[in-house]
Image: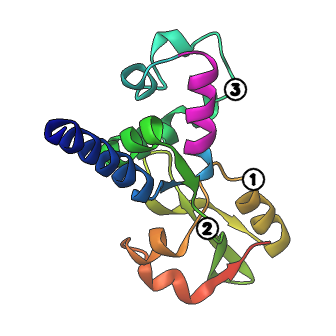
Amino acid sequence: GFEQGLLEGFQNGLSEAKQEKSPVQVPLVIANWIEYCKELNIDLINSMNPNHKIFTPHVAFKEKADVIFYWILNNSELYARAFLDGYEVKPEKRYSIAVPVGYGRYNRVIVSTNGNVTLDSRNYVSLDKLRKHDIKSLIPLTEELVKNSELAWSWQFATELE
């Protein structure tokens, strides 16, 4: 009886610990990737390399493969927990940053496929066109990304996207 009580107490403690563990938060693109991999019955280790040859016939994430790969590379433990234990989509505000370069032209701050915040090589005359490109970006420009980059000074030109 004593041993049975210990065993039941241990099992109850484990189930309570599992319930108390809050799900990790991941960006929407990572959440979509996890669901995609699970639908295809791809295991954790293979899902961590979206550039792997097993994904070649599936083009749904072809343009986002580098973005996903670098995010997983920089957040491998978080990704594993999300893949195995579940996740919540991290609510993130998206921003557009138009840096004035003179003569009514603007340069756009972007996130490259390797996750670095950088200045776009194009100059824009139209702020509307610049913001349309920001809306279509594969990696959203977030406050955290900008403020933790070498271009933190550009945050003064940020406007929130809807």
- Which of 147/33 is in front? 33
Q: Is residue 155 left or right of residue 75?
A: right
Total number of numbered discs in the rendering: 3
Q: CA distance from mark 1 to mark 2?
A: 15 Å
Check disc 1 and report its element: helix, strand or loop.
Answer: loop
Which amino acid type is shown beneath numbered disc 2?
Glu
Check disc 2 and report the residue beneath it: 92
Pointer 1 with pointer 2, Cβ within 8 A: no
Check disc 2 and report its element: helix, strand or loop.
Answer: loop
- Which of 41/144 is in front? 41
Splitting the image into 4 quarters, where does residue 5 fall?
Answer: top left
In this rendering, does residue 10 appear at all?
Answer: yes
Does the magenta segment cover residue 40? yes
Which of pointers 1 and 2 indicates the residue nearer the eye?
2
Tell which residue pokes out farthest to the left in this image.
3
| Image quadrant in which the N terminus is located | top left
Q: Earlier in the sequence, mark 1 or mark 3?
A: 3
Provide the residue span drawn in magenta: 30-41
Q: Is residue 160 left or right of residue 73?
A: right
Check disc 3 and report the residue beneath it: 60
Q: Position of residue 152 (x, y in %)?
A: 43, 80
For label 3, count other residues whose C-alpha is less than 10 Å away and answer few (under 14), some (14-19) or many (20+). Answer: few
Which amino acid type is shown beneath numbered disc 3?
Ala
Pointer 1 with pointer 3, Cβ within 8 A: no
Residue shown at 37% from the left, 38% from the top: 80
Splitting the image into 4 quarters, where does residue 92 fall?
Answer: bottom right
Q: Earlier in the sequence, mark 3 or mark 2?
A: 3
Q: Is residue 161 left or right of residue 17?
A: right
Q: Position of residue 81 (x, y in %)?
A: 38, 43
Q: Earlier in the sequence, mark 1 or mark 2?
A: 2
Residue shown at 57% from the left, 24% from the top: 38
Which amino acid type is shown beneath numbered disc 1?
Lys
